Image (cartoon, rainbow, N blue to C red):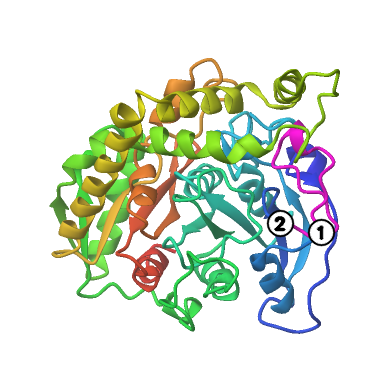
Amino acid sequence: MSADYNVFITEETIEGADDGPLADSTVAVKDNISTEGVRTTCGSEMLDDYVPPYDATVVERLKDAGATIVGKANMDEFGMGSTTETSAFGAAENPAAPGRVPGGSSGGSAAAVAAGEADLALGSDTGGSIRNPAAFCGVVGIKPTYGLVSRYGLVAYANSLEQIGPLAPTVEEAAALLDAISGPDERDATTREEGAGTDYAGAATGDVEDTTIGVPAELVEGADEGVRERFEASLDDLRERGATVEEVSLPSVEHAVEAYYVIAMSEASSNLARFDGVRYGHSGGFDGNWNEAFSKAREEAFGEEVKRRILLGTYALSAGYHDKYYKQAQDARAWVKQDFDEAFESVDVLASPTMPTPPFEVGESLDDPLQMYLADANTVPVNLADLPAISIPAGETDGLPVGIQFIGPAFGEEEIIRVGSALE
């Protein structure tokens, strides 16, 4: 069945412990997360035959929890894309909306859950890469607070932004997977003690009595009419269950997409410098000139979108432009964080449509990368502010899945899980 949707790059069974909280669960692992002895390609020809000698911390924790890993899920190359169409191994398909993209970059992970190819999945989210495919495939996805889940063994796209997180059919199952993978890790200095030992699955009570939900006008304005209708209907459901909904303002988010792409591409250009065919990756051969060898390796093995982001990121960091672009983007990031902090002084969680549109048609955004970048408007502010967010299915418009996003304060995963579970 997996051939139908092109969900997996590598199908391989990795057995977990005999018992544990996930003993009866199968898990698809995004192909940028290291699995000892099992090929990890990041969706790129550059790493077509790379086999890691070690497990990522999250993979160790999955095995300890008794989960069975059933394959490495398809993804946009090095996590760069919102549709899974930049994968060197062909696009994944959307089981919930044939002819439409499954979202990205964790599209294979979301599609695996939607198609029943795996009970659960792990993705990574740099600017929406878990929530976007969760919304497009009609499943639940959680982007944890930065520092809650170890990034050790994740092939980084943009270190300061990305987190590994769960995808699942229900909020409670996603929360149970978060329970298994979260917590501090001595091999990742960005992990924190906060949140350790929390029972996230136990937070999925659906109780929203006396909960105040803030709706940032800036994150609703650009959404399609059908998406807005589903969003409003979800808010009505929450009001009926005892929640209060009020409007809030996040003026900085209109600059979030620009700031995000400058920071993410800058970090990507730095991270991907190691893939030169000598230290890592596809070899360009050597004919006496190392620069030629490096160029040839990168020209042959990187796809168009990855090349575009490396070039833009290198430009933003170059002498004379660093202050104009990268420094300004970091200032904008601080402003976004400040706006969220102020909003959380008066509300418990924030709500918005996850994606402003239903899933794109296959091929639609490849000709217009800017359209793809702008589609991230509702998800990237969360990564800039290091906050947790969850995407929950919110019904359909014209037969296509729509997601609603709940954003919490730092390490406020229990809040967003509780509110999200009220809609199931």
Which quarter of the figure is the C terminus placed in?
A: bottom left
38 falls in the magenta region? yes
355 falls in the magenta region? no
Amino acid beneath label 2: Ala
Q: CA distance from mark 2 to mark 1?
A: 19 Å
Q: Which mark is residue 19?
A: none
- Classify 290 as above or below 359: above
Quick one: SS at disc 2? strand
Task: Report if residue 226 is visible in the image.
Answer: yes
Residue 259 x %, y %: 33, 36
Amino acid beneath label 1: Pro
Residue 295 x %, y %: 70, 20
Q: Earlier in the sequence, mark 2 or mark 1?
A: 2
The stretch of residues the image draws in magenta is 34-53
Which quarter of the figure is the N terminus placed in?
A: top right
Task: Report if residue 82 is visible in the image.
Answer: no
How many numbered markers are drawn? 2
Q: Main secondary structure of the magenta part?
A: loop
The answer to which quarter of the image holds residue 67 is: bottom right
* Disc 2 target residue: 28
- What residue is rendered at 30% in x and 60% in y? 237
- Classify 264 as above or below 284: below
- What residue is rendered at 75% in x and 40% in y? 279
Q: Nearer the viewer, residue 376 or 191?
A: 191
* Disc 1 target residue: 53
- Classify 271 as above or below 147: above
Few, some or many C-alpha atoms within 10 Å of disc 2 (few <14, some 14-19, many ≥20)? many
Most extreme residue toward the top is 367
